Amino acid sequence: MAMRIGLISDTHGLLRPDALAFLQGSDLIVHAGDIGGPDILQALSAIAPLTVVRGNNDRGPWAASIRETEWLQAAGINLYAIHDLAQLDVDPAAAGIQVVVSGHSHQPRVDRREGVLYVNPGSPGPRRFRLPISIGELLVGDSGRIDARTVELG
């Protein structure tokens, strides 16, 4: 079954209207950490089922139960979510993971290494330096083909 997975990271407590609009129609949303508060989680989970990982800035009782990594299966693919790619402690190709979603750098990026698709949607949160305000998506086709893109907002 074809599936659209919305990708977001580093909201830092700011959920822009255009980010919410972009995520509409997602079958699933993955937030790769530095969420900023439970209100962000409530807004995202109102759109689609939500998988989140804790970022280095997610502290306090609201974040205590959020794991640092998540491994999920969706549309026949294995997806691994982690906030900081530098802390990746698994060999995705050897583990059968097709997609790794991360955040932390605020730099949108899509690349493929050793058959694994790495996606950082960037950040639609508060602007940092001259980095773009961005978000991303995975499109998983019926054939199992996986396409990823990041989109600059505003």
Image (spheres, helix red, strand yellow):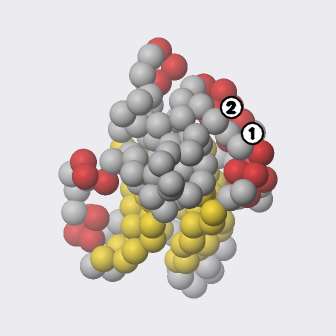
Label 1 crowd bin: few (<14), some (14–19), many (20+), radius 10 Å: few
In this image, 88 relative to 58: left or right?
Answer: left
Q: Can residue 50 be seen in the rendering of this structure?
A: yes
Question: Where 99 falls versus 13 (above or below)?
Answer: below
Residue at x-position 27% and y-position 79%: 114
Q: Choose between 137 and 123: the one closer to the eye.
A: 123
Which quadrant is home to the N terminus? bottom right
Q: Residue at x 45, y 67 (%)?
A: 109
Give the quadrant of the C terminus: bottom right
Say if 151 sits above or below 45 in the image: below
Q: Residue at x 55, y 77 (%)?
A: 147
* SS state under label 1: loop
* Residue 79 image point, x, y percent: 43, 60
Query: Is residue 108 shown left or right of residue 18?
Result: left
Callout 1 touching callout 2 (CB < 8 Å): yes
Residue wearing tag 1: 46
Q: Which residue is mark 2?
A: 42
Label for residue 128?
Answer: none
Q: CA distance from mark 1 to mark 2?
A: 6 Å
The residue lying furthest to the top in this view is 61
Q: Quadrant of residue 27?
A: bottom right
Residue at left offset 48%, top offset 48%: 129
Give the percent coordinates (x, y) of residue 73.
48, 59
Amino acid under disc 1: Ala
